[in-house]
Image (tube, rainbow, N blue to C red):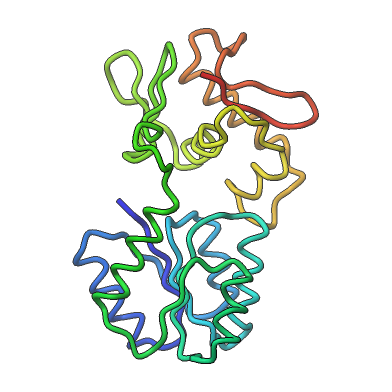
Amino acid sequence: MTRVLVVDDDPAIVRALVINLRARQYEVDSAEDGAGALRAAARHPDVVVLDLGLPDMDGVDVIRRLREWSRMPILVLSARHASGEKVQALDAGADDYVTKPFGMDELLARLRAAVRRAEPADGGDLVVETETFTVDLAAKKVHRDGGDVRLTPTEWHLLEVLVRGGGRLVGQKQLLREVWGPSYGTETNYLRVYMAQLRRKLEADPSRPRHLITEPGMGYRFEK
């Protein structure tokens, strides 16, 4: 189920979005200011709907902060109509821009498009198979020996970031920021603990991993 983070200081808009999104089977979190948005974003929503006129900081600054550690789609929803302000938000890293007042159908269509663009272009890439387990990125599930593997949310997100890396080395700092949030970067013991847990659940021989590979002092990579 797609999780949406709605960030707006207008309770009526937040309430309307929450009702409409939940009616369409989205999970919804909300925040009323920039600080709350950054805290909520650390829980890794699939897409952010962001107002620019927040009480504690400009929404463009929120976009820049999010882009320091995350690639999650950001859909701006703002009363600012000037083209220069739209360009500023898009240049900061927003994926789309909808002006207030807005039509709910248009907003939902743009939200769906933003989520689709964030998925791998080839639908086959959504399911990644190894000799011992299969990762279904769309369903957010892992299968092994004919059944589902139970992963914690943190274990899943760590695995997802590595699998989406497609064999590329993912640095320790990047992993910490993407999985635990932007305030993390030096807690490499977290990575050791959670990688050990993933290997116990997924690798045929956790002491000699074939798929969840450590590059000492640098980071980790996923190999089929």
Q: Quadrant of residue 8?
A: bottom left
Nearest the camera: 30 or 128? 128
Q: Is residue 2 left or right of residue 188?
A: left
Q: Is residue 53 left or right of residue 46?
A: right
Whole-percent x, y for residue 29 in the image: 39, 66
Q: Quadrant of residue 151?
A: top left
Whole-percent x, y for residue 103 in the image: 27, 83
37 is higher (above) or lower (below) than 185: below
Which residue corresponds to the image point at 43% horizontal and 80% vertical from the top-left? 77
Numbered label tally: 0
Nearest the camera: 129 or 192? 129
Looking at this view, name the residue that lies furthest to the right.
217
Whole-percent x, y for residue 163 in the image: 51, 32
Whole-percent x, y for residue 16 in the image: 28, 81
Q: Is residue 139 left or right of residue 151?
A: left
Which residue corresponds to the image point at 43% horizontal and 66% vertical from the top-left? 5
Looking at this view, name the residue that lies furthest to the front.
83
Which residue corresponds to the image point at 80% horizontal and 29% vertical from the top-left? 217
82 is higher (above) or lower (below) than 215: below
Nearest the camera: 212 or 191? 212
Q: Quadrant of residue 167?
A: top right
Which residue corresponds to the image point at 65% horizontal and 34% vertical from the top-left? 191
